[in-house]
């Protein structure tokens, strides 16, 4: 029942975002649209921004599902960009109404997780400390998030496949090279 209520709150928020900016939406607006009381909202979320974060995370998690390997990260990132584009009114509204650091906060854990899966797979035969693997994943994650934020800011005009293909050209072999430089066995 909890997931059903959360999904209903998500849909109400998305419906309302088609009509007005995020910073003009109240919890009362959401609960009235959803047909629940305020206490039910607060049972699931601390505030509207907590709901926004949950929605972003859930949508992205679904897009990245089973796409966290060296062979599938491009497909995962492409699916993530398409998920962002499918929710364009929601994403643009959030992007324009919250601090850019908050948007980065929503995106960063997802890209960290995607890239850490790739780094761990690539490091299977390399003796590298876990903290160094996380660091390498974070470096690439900042790159991905920055490119995604620019893409959103520019109204998501570029095709996701083209953007990911260009990223892949830049990254080709770089994760393996970075791991080799952190290799403790040298």
Image (spheres, rainbow, N blue to C red):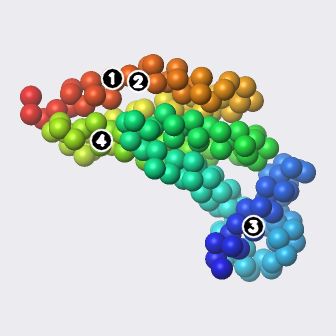
Q: Residue 103: x and y, percent?
A: 62, 44
The label nearer to you, 1 versus 3, is 1
Measured in 3D between alpha carbons, the distance from the residue under mark 1 to the one under mark 3, in whole angstroms, is 43 Å
Left/right of residue 116 with respect to residue 161 in the rendered view: left
Q: Which residue is mark 2?
A: 171
Q: Which residue is mark 3?
A: 9
- Which of the marked residues, 1 or 4, is nearer the chain's N terminus? 4
Left/right of residue 39 with respect to residue 172 in the rendered view: right
Could you classify mark 1 by the number of other residues whose Cα lies within 10 Å: few (under 14), some (14-19), or many (20 or more)?
A: few
Q: Residue furthest left?
A: 186
Left/right of residue 49 with respect to residue 168 in the rendered view: right
Measured in 3D between alpha carbons, the distance from the residue under mark 1 to the one under mark 2, in whole angstroms, is 6 Å
**Quick one: SS at disc 4?**
helix
Q: Is residue 9 above or below residue 20?
A: below
Q: Is residue 173 above or below residue 113?
A: above
Q: Residue 46: x and y, percent?
A: 65, 68
Could you classify mark 3 by the number of other residues whose Cα lies within 10 Å: few (under 14), some (14-19), or many (20 or more)?
A: many
**Quick one: SS at disc 3?**
helix
Q: Quadrant of residue 72?
A: top left
Could you classify mark 4 by the number of other residues whose Cα lies within 10 Å: few (under 14), some (14-19), or many (20 or more)?
A: some
* Residue plotted at (73% across, 25% down): 157
- Quarter of the image with the C terminus is top left
Q: Which residue is mark 4?
A: 121
Left/right of residue 134 with respect to residue 113 in the rendered view: left
Measured in 3D between alpha carbons, the distance from the residue under mark 4 to the one under mark 3, in whole angstroms, is 37 Å
Q: Which residue is mark 1?
A: 173
Measured in 3D between alpha carbons, the distance from the residue under mark 2 to the one under mark 4, in whole angstroms, is 15 Å
Q: Residue 11: x and y, percent?
A: 77, 61
Measured in 3D between alpha carbons, the distance from the residue under mark 1 to the one under mark 4, in whole angstroms, is 13 Å
Q: Are marks 1 and 2 in contact (CB under 8 Å)?
A: yes
* Residue plotted at (64% across, 77% down): 2
């Amino acid at each position: 029942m909890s997931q059903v209520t959360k999904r209903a709150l998500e849909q109400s928020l998305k419906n309302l975002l088609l009509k007005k900016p995020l910073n003009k939406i109240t919890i009362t607006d959401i609960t009235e649209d959803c047909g629940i009381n305020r206490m039910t909202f607060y049972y699931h979320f601390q505030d509207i921004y907590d709901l926004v974060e949950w929605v972003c995370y859930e949508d992205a998690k679904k897009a990245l599902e089973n796409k966290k390997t060296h062979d599938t990260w491009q497909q995962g990132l492409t699916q993530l960009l398409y998920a962002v584009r499918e929710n364009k009114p929601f994403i643009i509204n959030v992007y324009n109404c919250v601090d850019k650091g908050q948007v980065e906060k929503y995106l960063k854990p997802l890209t960290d997780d995607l890239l850490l899966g790739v780094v761990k797979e690539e490091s299977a035969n390399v003796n590298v400390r876990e903290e160094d693997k996380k660091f390498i994943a974070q470096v690439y994650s900042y790159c991905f998030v920055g490119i995604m934020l620019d893409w959103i800011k520019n109204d998501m005009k570029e095709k996701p496949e083209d953007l990911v293909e260009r990223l892949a050209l830049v990254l080709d072999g770089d994760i393996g090279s970075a791991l080799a430089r952190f290799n403790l066995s040298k």
